[in-house]
Image (cartoon, rainbow, N blue to C red):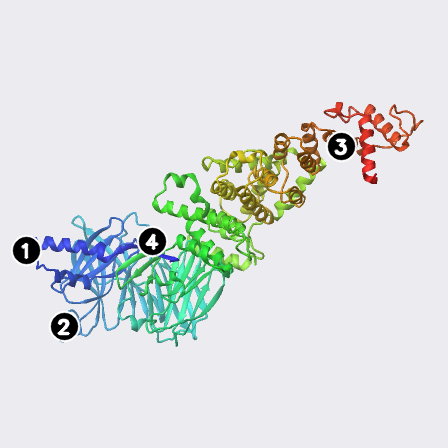
Amino acid sequence: MALRLVADFDLGKDVLPWLRAQRAVSEASGAGSGGADVLENDYESLRVLNVERNGNIIYTYKDDKGNVVFGLYDCQTRQNELLYTFEKDLQVFSCSVNSERTLLAASLVQSTKEGKRNELQPGSKCLTLLVEIHPVNNVKVLKAVDSYIWVQFLYPHIESHPLPENHLLLISEEKYIEQFRIHVAQEDGNRVVIKNSGHLPRDRIAEDFVWAQWDMSEQRLYYIDLKKSRSILKCIQFYAHESYNLMFEVPLDISLSNSGFKLVNFGCDYQDRDKFSKHLTLCVFTNHTGSLCVCYSPKCASWEQITYSVFYIHKGHSKTFTTSLENVGSHVTKGITFLNLDYYVAVYLPGHFFHLLNVQHPDLICHNLFLTGNNEMIDMLPHCPLQSLSGSLVLDCCSGKLYRALLSQSSLLQLLQNTCLDCEKMAALHCALYCGQGAQLLEGQWRQRADLNTNRVLSDFLKIIQWISENVSACHSFDLIQEFIIASSYWSVYSETSNMDKLLPHSSVLTWNTVLSFKGYWEKLNSNLEYVKYAKPHFHYNNSVVRREWHNLISEEKTGKRRSAAYVRNILDNAVKVISNLEARNLGPRLTPLLQEEDSHQRLLMGLMVSELKDHFLRHLQGVEKKKIEQMVLDYISKLLYLICHIVETNWRKHNLHSWVLHFNSRGSAAEFAVFHIMTRILEATNSLFLPLPPGFHTLHTILGVQCLPLHNLLHCIDSGVLLLTETAVIRLMKDLDNTEKNEKLKFSIIVRLPPLIGQKICRLWDHPMSSNIISRNHVMRLLQNYKKQPRNSMINKSSFSVEFLPLNYFIEILTDIESSNQALYPFEGHDNVDAEFVEEAALKHTAMLLGL
């Protein structure tokens, strides 16, 4: 299934065995009455009450005497602890314990049975109590009313030492929220007591609200009040050493009834579920990158069609989705479920649909994944109502299980392989890469400390590379290799700074002002909002400047006019750093000869990309150290190159190719052609994005092309720029191939297509008359480039190589004069191979050829 629920806690496995052990000890001492029936009763009454910020879980059950028992499961030590026992037959409604486990707050509903209603407080239905539990001491009644009260202790973000004051929130069904400030003191060693328990200071936090949600992880309170029939979402942030701040007010385009009431994540919402959840489903999700989403689904008049909306507050817009349900049965009564999956939000209705929304980049609808009930992944999801807590935690109140919701990379890979739709392929690819966090899983440090889970994710990531290699043409709407390289490189570095998603492209597919100084989440949220407000156009880096500068440098190289040596040396030094950073990643033994040669053009491209990307980050990443930015740039570019190397290496190993493939001793096999094809697709993908390739890529690609392609196809690929002739590849070709007629034709066709500087060098390595012919022509061209006509006394008969063709006599005379007078200005290696007689012969043959004689 696309969503994987991993159990972090299970009442039946983590608490019940401990209860049995406690019962056995009690029976052995004669202090209790045993029996399996009693244990079964304990399990039936066993329920989760709350999950605190530190992950500790509070639960309750009734013992054999009907007493209410409170227990705590420590998620760190995985140990259970008895907190408190009420020797009364009460129904626990809400509970919370402070971080030091010295105070317990609980709301209990008195029994309505005759004769039992007024045991603790006459005339009240709900009692809210504050208990000293370290050790057990006084019990103070905070509220005794007929309305429901929820309780929640605040947990300070700094938990290194106990604070002298505890803060407790009380949320009333009467639509107000209060904060109690409870001062405690230690007496007689570890005994903790409440100071001035007769009068506890309290503040009214909010009132007249219709909905509220608690964020236990970040200590935030969200609530909605109605002003002139408008729904206003407000947020209060609580701090350790301060009271609280109202962070924002945002109007929402939703219709809420003033008579409604709904609470989210204030403990387990099992009590009177129907009463408090009939009219809407609404929740707020945030993550560490500064996103803020409001998910909303109104009450459904009919289950044949469901509508839900997602407000991307951090992006300044919202989207509403409507889906029709097929085969609607009577079991569809609980409505849809929203789950926070960090970078994604999941919306699902068990047995009907599963919708995965990309929160960080909602503008690209193709990054969302929508699966219908026909997909077997949907049927595997729980059909019971789930409560989404902070940090991808999901609580099933019915079964008492706490899950960690994760996207299943294996299932996403299966979907990637089986789906026919391009949009689903793209969404599944991005989700799968997010699960594996891209290329960093392939690095040496992961391998050294890999556990079973990491090995599984690594295996899935390699399967993605293999699938892309085998299905490189499977998508018509986008280039699979491009999308893989861009997305994987993005995911490998996105966590290094909160602004990375705005500065680096995440896909190859293109289509409120504050006066306070905030830190952490609020700083990132404000950054997102400022980006939405002012970013025209987007800040995403692209290689347009690199493309222009690289072409300039290559043109200057051809004409021999290159700018200062210091500038070029700095560019090449950048490339050296990238290669060193790449090689330091412990790639292990490689079969392919990549990164083993000097490729000046690719090194120029690498170095230019380092310079431009560094400038881009320096402009937009304010407050980040320059050294850190430089390292981020090196990491990004080296990981990008690493992905290309790994795709080639994976295909090389898959087809069992070896180093002897690189010699021109036989025609290419089907395996070599398959690798040549995938390298061609990599080249197409990187060319359109103007990304660098690892040195040696063009040499390997050309060698495979020579072996696999007929001559006319080979020359067409060279002329169209698909194959780039490198000096290394051509030298190997000249040395490995003998001078048969077929090979001579190939060599000559290659030489005439080489750049002049490389061509002259290669010709001197080929001992063949054709090579001498080319050398003589190049020599004459160089002699005549700067020739200026000088007055002459005699135009003819000066040459010792006189022939009847007078224009040629004149031409030979000019060459002889230039050679004799300007030899010092035009030194030429291998001059012994060039003389006027040979030039004369070459000129006659060339003229005859041009005239068709």
Q: What residue type is labelled 2?
A: Lys
Numbered circle sitting on residue 30: 1
Number of the front mark, 2 or 3: 3
Q: Is mark 4 on a helix, strand or loop?
A: loop
Q: Which sits earlier in the primary sequence, circle 1 or circle 4?
A: 1
Closer-to-camera residue (733/371): 733
Q: Are marks 1 and 4 in contact (CB under 8 Å)?
A: no
- Secondary structure of the residue carrying tag 2 is loop
Residue 261 image point, x, y percent: 33, 72
Residue with the mark numbered 4 = 241
Give the mark toward the camera: 1 or 2. 1
The amino acid type, in three-letter code, at marker 3 is: Asn
Q: Which of 344 and 250 is in front in this view?
A: 344
**At label 4, which amino acid type do we have?**
His
* Left/right of residue 805 with respect to residue 828 in the rendered view: right
Residue 624 position within the rendered picture, expressed as x and y whole percent measured from the top left: 49, 45
Query: Label 3, label 1: how many angstroms apart (C-alpha)?
Result: 110 Å
Q: Callout 1, which amino acid?
A: Gly
User: Is 852 left, or right, of 85 in this rendering?
Assistant: right
Q: Earlier in the sequence, mark 2 or mark 3?
A: 2
Q: Are marks 2 and 3 in contact (CB under 8 Å)?
A: no
Percent across and percent down for residue 135 are 16, 54
Q: Mark 3 points at which residue?
A: 778
User: Considering only vertical position in the picture, is 447 above or below 343?
Assistant: above
Label 3: few (<14), some (14–19) or many (≥20) C-alpha neighbours in 10 Å: some
**CB of mark 3 within 8 Å of CB of mark 1?**
no
Horizontal arrangement in the rendering, residue 576 relative to residue 41 (left or right)? right
Foreground disc of the pair 3, 1: 3
